[in-house]
Image (tube, rainbow, N blue to C red):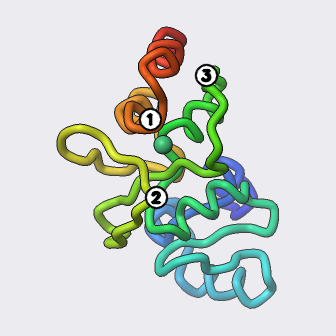
């Protein structure tokens, strides 16, 4: 698969595993880095120059975009919030970030760089008040 198509599919941030699964080789990844098309933002994760900076920040922080950030990217109305990036740490991130969003119960495995609506809702109750949460949940 061509890098451009793959990158567009994943919002400008992809993992080595995604690139390999889509038919790219480690050599092609190195070549893309050498010409500046891809930049390594974390071990096993790459971004293009035009990648969404919020998604890049989430992945660089050791996780994926979630909570209010992911809901907003899916078109769900979210209340005003002071943080520019709501993210959650993934198991593979192995980073303890105090500003990461949390959920009640066990963490959910990440399947992409931006959580789906259902997963993002699980991580949002700590970041919004009850009215804000009810408003978000009623639109999903
Ligand atoms: Zn949050």
For residue 99, the mark is 2
Name above or below for residue 70 compared with residue 1: above
Q: Residue 125's x, y, as percent?
A: 38, 31
* In this view, the mark in front (1 or 2): 2
Q: Residue 72's x, y, as percent?
A: 63, 32
* In this view, the mark in front (3 or 2): 2
- Label 2 crowd (10 A; few <14 / some 14-19 / many >=20): few
Residue 86 as seen in the image, left or right of residue 52 = left
Q: Is the shortest distance between ligand 1 and the CB of mark 2 under 8 Å?
A: no
CA gap between label 3 and label 2 equals: 22 Å
Residue at screen point 77% across, 76% down: 37
Residue 11 as seen in the image, left or right of residue 4 = left
Residue at screen point 52% across, 20% down: 132
Mark 1–mark 3 contact, CB under 8 Å? Answer: no
CA gap between label 1 and label 2 equals: 16 Å
Quarter of the image for the N terminus: give it: bottom right
Mark 1–mark 2 contact, CB under 8 Å? Answer: no
Q: Residue tagged by mark 3?
A: 76
Q: Which of marks 2 and 3 precedes in the sequence?
A: 3
Q: Residue tagged by mark 1?
A: 120
Q: Which of marks 2 and 1 precedes in the sequence?
A: 2
CA gap between label 1 and label 3 equals: 11 Å
Name, please, the residue furthest toward the left: 105
Q: Which of marks 3 and 1 precedes in the sequence?
A: 3
Q: Is the shortest distance between ligand 1 and the CB of mark 3 under 8 Å?
A: no
| Secondary structure beneath label 1 | helix
Name above or below for residue 21 compared with residue 114: below
Q: Residue 56's x, y, as percent?
A: 63, 63
């Amino acid at each position: 698969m061509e890098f451009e198509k793959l990158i567009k599919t994943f919002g400008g941030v992809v993992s080595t595993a995604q690139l390999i699964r889509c038919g790219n080789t480690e050599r092609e990844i190195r070549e893309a880095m050498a010409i500046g098309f891809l930049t390594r933002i974390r071990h096993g994760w790459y971004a293009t120059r035009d990648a969404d900076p919020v998604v890049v920040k989430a992945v660089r922080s050791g996780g994926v975009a979630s909570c209010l950030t992911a809901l907003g990217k899916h078109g769900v109305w979210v209340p005003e919030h002071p943080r520019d990036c709501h993210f959650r740490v993934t198991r593979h991130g192995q980073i303890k970030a105090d500003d990461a969003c949390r959920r009640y119960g066990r963490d959910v495995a990440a399947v992409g760089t931006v959580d789906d609506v259902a997963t993002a809702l699980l991580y949002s109750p700590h970041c919004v008040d009850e009215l804000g949460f009810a408003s978000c949940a009623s639109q999903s």
